[in-house]
Amino acid sequence: MGDFPEEIAANLDRADESLQAARILLEEGFSDSAASRAYYAVFYAASSLLLNEGLEYGRHSGVIAAVHHRFVKTGRLDTEFGKDLNWLFELRNIGDYGATRHVPRDDAVKALEAADRFCRAVRALLKTP
């Protein structure tokens, strides 16, 4: 797993934990927080993917741009994953900073499904269970 095996594994663990937290939050009716956790699951998984390539980014925008450049545009990840990543980032901004806007429950459900698919795709690329 690249030059950062411990960091990659730690990010994958955080992705799994964020998915689990998103499920719990959704069940309890916290759509904003569930959507945010779904995004973070994808962010951690994406960070693992980039670390596997020897790349580290300190900003969300850098991670998102690098995933598009290195994985979506090259066909290593389907374009749907790139769209999901962008949408989840937008939802996270609404959930965390929306003031008067909130993430509808249906969107939070879709966010969790998209995050789960993204994380599975990353694990397949990294060849980890």
Image: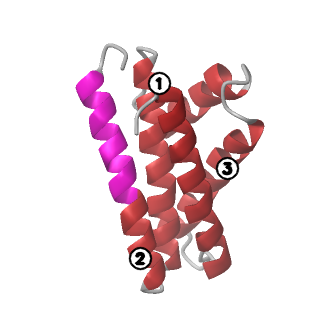
C-alpha separation, residue under disc 3 versus residue under disc 1 = 17 Å
C-alpha separation, residue under disc 1 versus residue under disc 2 = 28 Å
Mark with earlier residue (3, 1):
1
Mark with earlier residue (1, 2):
2
Asked if labels 2 and 1 touch by Cβ distance under 8 angstroms, the answer is no
- Which three-letter amino acid code belongs to the residue tagged 3? Asp
Residue 77 x, y percent position in the rendering: 67, 31
Secondary structure, mark 3, is helix
User: Which quadrant of the view contains residue 25?
Assistant: bottom left
C-alpha separation, residue under disc 3 versus residue under disc 2 = 20 Å
Q: Quadrant of the N terminus?
A: top left
Mark with earlier residue (3, 2):
2
Tell me which segment is drawn in magenta: 5-18
Query: What residue is shown with label 3?
Result: 84
Query: What residue is shown with label 2?
Result: 25
- Which three-letter amino acid code belongs to the residue tagged 1? Leu
Q: Is residue 96 visible?
A: yes
